[in-house]
Amino acid sequence: MSGRIPREFIDELLVRVDIVDLIDSHVPLKKTGNNFVARCPFHAEKTPSFSVNRKKQFFHCFGCGASGNAISFLMDFSHLDFIEAVEDLAGFVGVDIPRISSEYKPEQKNEDLNSLYLLMEQVTGFYVSQLRTSDAGKLAVEYLKNRGVSSACADDFMIGYAPDEWRVLATRFNPKALLDAGLLISKDGGQPYDRFRGRIMFPIRDKRSRIVGFGGRVLDDSLPKYLNSPETPLFHKGKEVYGLFELLEKNSKPSRILIVEGYMDVIALAQFGIHYAVAALGTAASQAHLDLLFRFSSELVFCFDGDKAGREAAWRAMEPAFSSLKDGRQIRVMLLPQNHDPDSLVREEGIDGFIGRVQSSETLSEFFFAHCSSALNLSEMEGRAQLIIKAKPYLEKLPESVFKEMMFSRLKELSGWDYLDVLENTATLATKQTSKQKYADNKNRAPNTGRLSSARMAIALLVQNPWLGEMLDQQEIVWDELDFPGVSLFKNVQNMIADKNPATTASLVECYRDSSEEKSIKALALLDSLIPDDGVEAEFFDAISRLVIQSRERSLSMLLNKEKNEGLTSQEKQLLLKILTVK
């Protein structure tokens, strides 16, 4: 492809990616405190010194010093140049790369995306309050209680209620933002109105806890029973699943993930302590869904109703399933008894009975060949030929692997066709050693845990929390009067945040790639300020206040000495008077 990749797209890509998921797909990570750790992929070591921080979207090795954002990791790990790494990252996220030569216009600026995330959080809070306090919400609470949903479980999933009114959101929030978020419907010639009305609301959270969409269920039998958010800049139903964030909160590495059909199935199972269920969002599970889930578990179990519709749904899942089955991955199929859903079955058979069914569910190979041959007479040549015609296109979708060879061997066995091509196994694991011998004096160096100076604290907190920049702009600070070590870098960072509006530390660091300040910015991103999240704002502005006072005291001392020894110019006298009169 020709043309440069727009900077706006690179910023948006870093907002969308989760560096923990990216690195974990290459190097298995283990959660330790607020970070994820592993043995460094860039040098040989016996104990983990490689750390990944989800909040900052940044990695660092305390052994060899390697550090950076998602793009930097791909460049170092896969030996890619910058463009190749961005292309790989776009493929990982599942988006196409625009080029400036194609007259690229960003669909949404980063600041717009961030404002939409904030809006979704505020709307969720409104729905939750309506469930708890409104008269109509009490009916929704009664419905949930009848379904066996406890208050604690409702809190975990942030369940709310949308009032049965046409314009309740538009009177409380920005209508333009509501339209962008898919919460209003616009009709020609009429006022926009609320998409969700008179429904129990299920917020859909991405892996980073951000609310990207909603599902809504009616309290009666009216149709449509379920309504989902439309496609928006935040929400793509073919790439998100309901309940994944809540699942990962309970267990970041589940032994298996159960794919069920609806929101209430996920919640009902969680109510019984089965915290590894997710649901596709009003659509069949796609390859993007499966590839997403396989990042967290090597075994997926499809759970469908046992009726004809359920079996047909299970068969439709085969195409994306076969495309996703690399070596080390496994898919099973669990068909429920007639007239049961996961909720009713776990109540009837208990937790142990339900889990027993999950563990003994059919393997993909068993289900596939049973379905393919169910209406065929394999004692006849015609039946065996039909089996090959039906099965072979699916098997060809399998990635090159031992499993693919075995599936072709099974088809050959069932069909009895000696000339059936069995593709040679090319799935040999390539052992590619990546070495980055950057050992220096910082080998095995622990992070600085001493008290930081006010200047270092302020700059580090600003780099690690770019959202502070907007708040800082609202302060009446005369920057030209400030004088402290690092003030030029501080101003540089503040100007960069104002200009680029980076959403994360990773995005801010990307703005400094190949610049003279890059090394300093990376170092500040890695500093451990030892400040809890809820204390960052207060500590930052305390540090700023100390710097302002220190600068005034320094200026005052200099002016008083000069007045005593040389005398002051008229301009200096005005400055001295100003400092002396500041409260």
Image (spheres, rainbow, N blue to C red):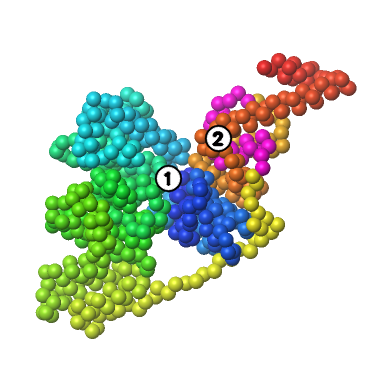
Residue depicted at 65% across the width and 54% down the height: 445
Who is closer to the viewer here, 269 or 105? 269
Span highlighted in magenta in the image: 450-477
Image quadrant occupied by the N terminus: bottom left
Callout 2: helix, strand or loop?
helix
Who is closer to the viewer here, 451 or 114? 451
Q: Position of residue 87 (x, y in %)?
A: 46, 56
Residue depicted at 37% across the width and 35% down the height: 120
Above or below, 30 against 227 in this view is below
Above or below, 138 against 50 in this view is above
Residue depicted at 54% across the width and 38% down the height: 532
Residue depicted at 23% across the width and 56% down the height: 353
Q: Position of residue 210 (x, y in %)?
A: 40, 41
Callout 1: helix, strand or loop?
loop
Circle 2 is placed at which residue position?
536
Please name the predominant secondary structure of the magenta segment in the image.
helix
Image quadrant occupied by the C terminus: top right
Q: Is 465 within the magenta? A: yes
Q: Is residue 451 left or right of residue 503?
A: right
Q: Position of residue 217 (x, y in %)?
A: 22, 38
Label of residue 208 in the image: 1
Q: Give the Cα separation between the discs numbered 1 and 2.
A: 20 Å
Q: Amino acid at mark 2?
A: Val
Q: Quadrant of residue 254?
A: bottom left
Q: Amino acid at mark 1?
A: Arg
Pointers 1 and 2 in contact (CB under 8 A)?
A: no
